[in-house]
Image: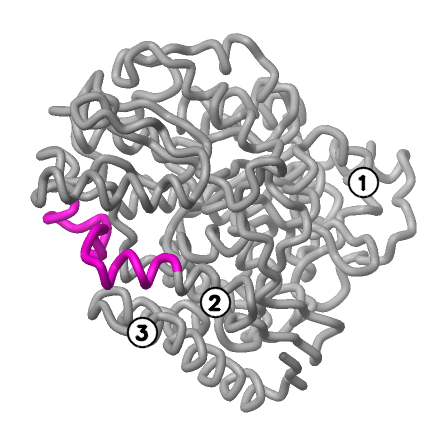
Amino acid sequence: MSKFLSAASSAPLNRRGFLAATGALTLASTLSACGGGSSGGSSAKAVSQADMDKAMKTPTELVFWTWVPNIDKEVALFQQKYPAIKVKVVNAGQGVTHYTKLRTALKAGSGAPDAVQIEYQAIPTFTITDSLLDLRPYGAAKLKDTFVDWTWGQVGGADGEVFAIPQDTGPMGMLYRKDIFDKHKIEVPTTWDEFAAAARKLHKADPNVYLTNLAANEAAAWHGLLWQAGAKPYALSGKSDITISVDDTVSRKLGDYWGGLAKEGVIGTEPDFADSWYAALNKGKYATWITAAWGPSFLSGSAKSTAGHWRAAPLPQWDASKPSAGNWGGSTTAVIKSTKNAIAAAMFAQFLNSDPASAKMFATEQFFFPATKALLGDASFTGDAPSFYGGQKVNQVFADISSTVSPTFQWPPFLDQAATDWTETVGKSLADRTDTVRALGAWQTRLTGYAKKQGFTVTS
């Protein structure tokens, strides 16, 4: 079994457990405004080394909220280096539950943790309410070159703030069934035009098989495809001005493409991570899975009957001369601004994700896909050749993909509403095989109306 890609070699994976652990849940609940914390040292003025040394030698207990399984192992490394600092690890839930509890604690002004696990897409929800500590005064800016460039863009603020430290990522690629491709003489598509042609060819040859399934309940995947295509669906300026462009030219290109394939009936649109979807993967109903770097580990535990048949490739491209990818999933460690232990919490967030031993442990224990450049260039990671993928160096494939993810994609501060509205408009059009381009207009209208009701000034 693969050292890095065998997350569920002994038992079927639980979808929420695995995807929550990887930060790859469908777009999490990040709705209403919450009260920001009080003083926490968010000024960019550096904390003195003497003060930092003193704090790290002072007996302190930090509370850390996280859904990551077995993270006590990484936490232990921090406590070995700083024995005066004790970290209480609390699993406050996953997805909606986690963020709801955090918002409630922040609004109440008590009960919030010192440090917290937070997905990239959820960060704006908490920065807009001034709830996260700027980590620059504690040396975080020095870590910029440690991480893949685009991840640093995801944790930064408009004025150069560093609101979290990257932990793992989900650059998007394509897993495909080599045996099905070989049987039907299908070449691995390198462009979306080739992908569409292959979808038609395969389904015509075998009506029981589809090239892929674009789940009608998966707003996260759609956002990743928007990201790859160069879309800018959201652009927040300050705390009250936002541009919403989910119905622009790029979005309509995606709507026409995927909606057209759905209408033709040459791709599936069934909900993912459901029993029927698992069965379909095991039975060979779908010849590809458009997924992220956490997908190989997940699939190896969820489609065991297909072992040896799968391979990995980059996503097909809109412009083959300019390779690009989106991201789906991944998370960070942030510090709550109201913490009374700002120095210790900031040092913890940095150590947890930048210390080489800790970062590698995430890859080998939790099977996270790395955010650090060092690990993505480590031959012991990229050279792994799991038998489930026919001995292919799958980590290397996704490491290469990671370098093509754009650093400019932004998220809105009401992502759960965006996901809900997408499912009820665009997702529904895919499931019903109706007009997806028209559905984009409905999504735009609904989301714009919601943002205005929340007090935002909206442009499109």
Q: Is residue 369 magenta?
A: no
**Circle 3: residue type:** Asp
Residue 265 sits above or below residue 198 on the image: below
Pinpoint residue 72: horizontal percent, then vertical percent: 45, 31
Q: Residue at x 27, y 61 (%)?
A: 216
Q: Are marks 2 and 3 in contact (CB under 8 Å)?
A: no
Is 387 displayed left or right of 284 in the figure?
A: right
- The answer for how far apart the CA atoms under marks 1 and 2 are is 38 Å
Residue that carries the numbered disc 3 in the rendered image:
435
Residue in the foreground of this view, choosing between 359 and 416: 416
Q: Pick whichever, 34 or 12, lies toward us.
A: 12
The range drawn in magenta is 257-278
Q: Nearer the viewer, residue 64 or 378?
A: 378
Residue 6's disc is: none
* Residue wearing tag 2: 252
Tell me, yes or no, whether the highlighted magenta stretch contains residue 266. Answer: yes
Secondary structure at badge 2 equals: helix
Q: Quadrant of residue 367?
A: top left
Q: SS of the residue at dot 1?
A: helix
